[in-house]
Image (cartoon, grey):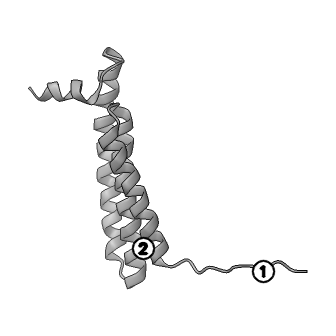
Amino acid sequence: MSAAVLAVEVTSTWYLVLAAALFCIGMVGVMVRRNPLVMFMCVELMLNAVNLSFVALASELGDIRGQTIVLFVMVVAAAEVVVGLGIVVAILRRRPKATADDLAELKG
């Protein structure tokens, strides 16, 4: 007896659903968590979800502009990680139990 194999074609809809799920996870993480590092990772997760949707739609439309936008978003995200993560780690070294509410006091 042979097992029935279910062949599912992966279309851009699957990628868009995955991107929406990743974005929702990141959004809930930003709203619920107070740890600045976790919030930072959730923002990066949301950026990657948007990048995934740009690539899926660019592939669906046969256009390179979506992938070009993703390249620029990744460059900006890398610069954000360098600066933002450096600031957050420096603050957390001085105050290990600092929360996002404590960081809001740094507005000046």
Q: Within the image, what quadrant is residue 16 found in? A: bottom left
**How far separated are the C-alphas under marks 2 and 1?**
30 Å
Relative image position of residue 67 (x, y in whole percent): 37, 70
SS for tag 1?
loop
Q: Residue 3, image x and y in percent?
A: 82, 77
| Image point (40%, 70%), residue name | 55
Which residue: 18% across, 29% down?
104
Query: Is mark 2 in CB contact (under 8 Å) with mark 1?
Result: no
Q: Is residue 77 left or right of residue 59?
A: left
- Image height of 14 relative to 28, above or below: below
Judging depth in this view, the residue of 72 and 5 nearest the camera is: 5
| Residue 34 image label | none
Q: Is residue 24 above or below residue 102?
A: below
Residue drawn at x 36%, y 69% as measured from the top left = 54
Q: Say which label, 2 or 1, has the lower sequence index.
A: 1
For residue 4, the mark is 1
Residue mark closest to the camera, 2 vs 1: 1
Quadrant containing the C terminus in the rendered view:
top left
The type of residue carrying mark 2 is Ala
Quarter of the image where one finds residue 36 = top left
Residue 81, can we see it? no
Which three-letter amino acid code belongs to the residue tagged 1? Ala
Callout 2 secondary element: helix
Task: Give neighbour class at mark 2: few <14, some 14-19, many 20+ (Cα, 10 Å).
Answer: many
User: As rendered, which of 2 and 41 lies closer to the eye?
Assistant: 2
**Quadrant containing the N terminus in the rendered view:** bottom right
Q: Which residue is farthest top?
A: 94
Residue 96, quarter of the rendered image? top left
| Vertical side of 24 occupied by 97: above or below | above
Q: Position of residue 87 (x, y in %)?
A: 28, 29
Label at residue 56 = 2
